[in-house]
Image: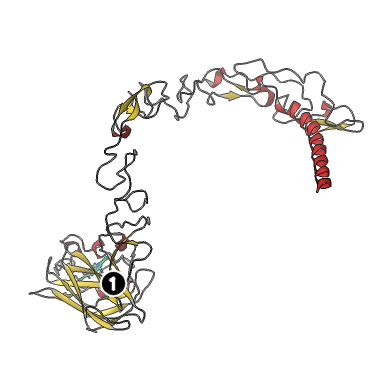
Amino acid sequence: MTRELRSFVAIGVSMLAACLSAPAVAKPTGYNLVCSNCHDGGAQPTVTVTAMPTTVAPGGVTTLTVSVTRTNGNRAGFFVTTRGKGEFQLVDAVGTRLIAASDEGPAGVTHTMPKTSTTGDNVFQVRWKAPAQMGSVDFDVYAVSATGKISPTTNMVFPEDDGMGHKRLGFSFGCAGSSFWPDTDGDGFGATDPDGPTQLCQQMKGFAVTSDDCNDGDAAINPKATEVCNQVDDDCDGKVDEDLPPVPLYKDTDNDGYGVPPAVMMGACGAINGFSPRIGDCNDNDRMIHPGVKETCNAVDDDCDGRLDNGVLPTCGVGWCARTSASCSASACIPGKPRPEVCNGFDDDCNGVVDDGAAICPAGQACVNAVCVGAGADAGTTPDTRPGVTGGATAGGCAIGDRPPVGRWVVPVVAAIVPLLARGWRRRRRSASRQA
Ligand code: HEC
């Protein structure tokens, strides 16, 4: 299915009704303009489109003739669209009808009844009036060659034996016009489009003269690009990383993308089985072990950072009592012993609450931001010398708490430093304004 066709979603039930000849069947509400969604079991007919005259002045009228080969049978239907450019006029008011644009598809012309021929192609005609401004247009024609066979049991035709063909005719009015291909990545090289080229008066942004870009989503890839060592065909010659100098590679026995020294100079830009351009594997016989792997609790250094089960060992306890288990078993985790709560920004008694309890500050003071403040208090600068404040956790395995709890010293230190900094800054500002 082409990009163009896919973007074309659906035309109304009205059009479905228009393309039906046999008695009504239960039909999907609204349907995709891609006729081959339903008419798909048979072969593709050849669709031919001609415009007469072959060129007109702006505002001029040309007549399109669409012929559809009788590939699957004697019946045929069609739909032609310019996606809104110009204006269609009916030639054969009985056999064809205009369709307005809707959110289900673009405006165009379709058959009212399928044509039936027993000799040559089925032929449809429609007139088209060019816009008043010079320009170009693509006529896109989708046509079905149908068997016309009717099921004796259901009394319906068999769309599944029919086939769809597509043809695009480029047409210009007021200019010579020529064909261009979509250049989405703007690298000056267009991509092939199965619907065919687009007719334009002159090249514009988003279009290129050639259709030889092998990746129109990446401006660094086109026929004039330089091949680089990246396992990609950068220059669109069908070869990947050809003619490039050897690169250092490392033996990667387990093929996990990480090898071990020493380096060996090899070609193919590193795309060699059993070798990798990266080092850092701490176990080259296990592809589940290499840098970047998520560490799991298994007594193994999975991510090759030199540490076993770091960050994934079970933990237990809260506050001061929080501990990490010595092994992957949660039952091996022993919480630390609680100690009396003091005003230090830390949960000493391991009840989940920081600095709670009545007796954590001298009478008349309150614990605010880890410091006892209130009547007579020298907030923030008096070192806390009360017993129980110093010391770290020693109980249990590798204790989280064997670093001293942060809140105990950070707050007084910050409280002491900030006024000093502020004073220095004010002084600098004053001298700066004196100089000015
Ligand atoms: C959603 C499915 C669907 C799509 C899409 C569809 N059709 Fe149909 N078409 C049918 C069905 C179903 C019938 C048979 C109806 C019946 O028997 O009542 C039919 C019948 C026809 C017939 C008559 C076949 C015959 O054997 O007599 C023609 C011609 C036709 N369609 C053309 C088209 C064209 C051209 C398109 C695209 C522009 C198209 N259809 C898109 C479902 C579809």
Which image quadrant is residue 431 in?
Answer: top right
Q: Position of residue 120 (x, y in %)?
A: 9, 74
Judging depth in this view, the residue of 129 and 120 nearest the camera is 129
Q: Identify which residue is drawn at 25% across, 69% down.
A: 25
Q: Position of residue 154 (x, y in %)?
A: 19, 66
Which image quadrant is residue 392 in?
Answer: top right
Quadrant occupied by the N terminus? bottom left
Judging depth in this view, the residue of 272 and 45 nearest the camera is 272
Residue lying farthest to the right in this orientation? 376
Judging depth in this view, the residue of 388 and 139 nearest the camera is 139
Q: Position of residue 300 (x, y in %)?
A: 46, 20
Tell me if residue 143 can be seen: yes
Report the residue marked by disc 1. Answer: 177
Would you place residue 210 above or below residue 149 in this image?
above
Disc 1 crowd, CA 10 A, few/some/many (<14, 14-19, 20+): many
Which kind of residue does numbered mark 1 sit on? Answer: Gly
Residue lying farthest to the left in this orientation? 119
Q: Regarding ligand 1, which quadrant of the image does it lie in?
A: bottom left
Specify the color scheme: secondary structure
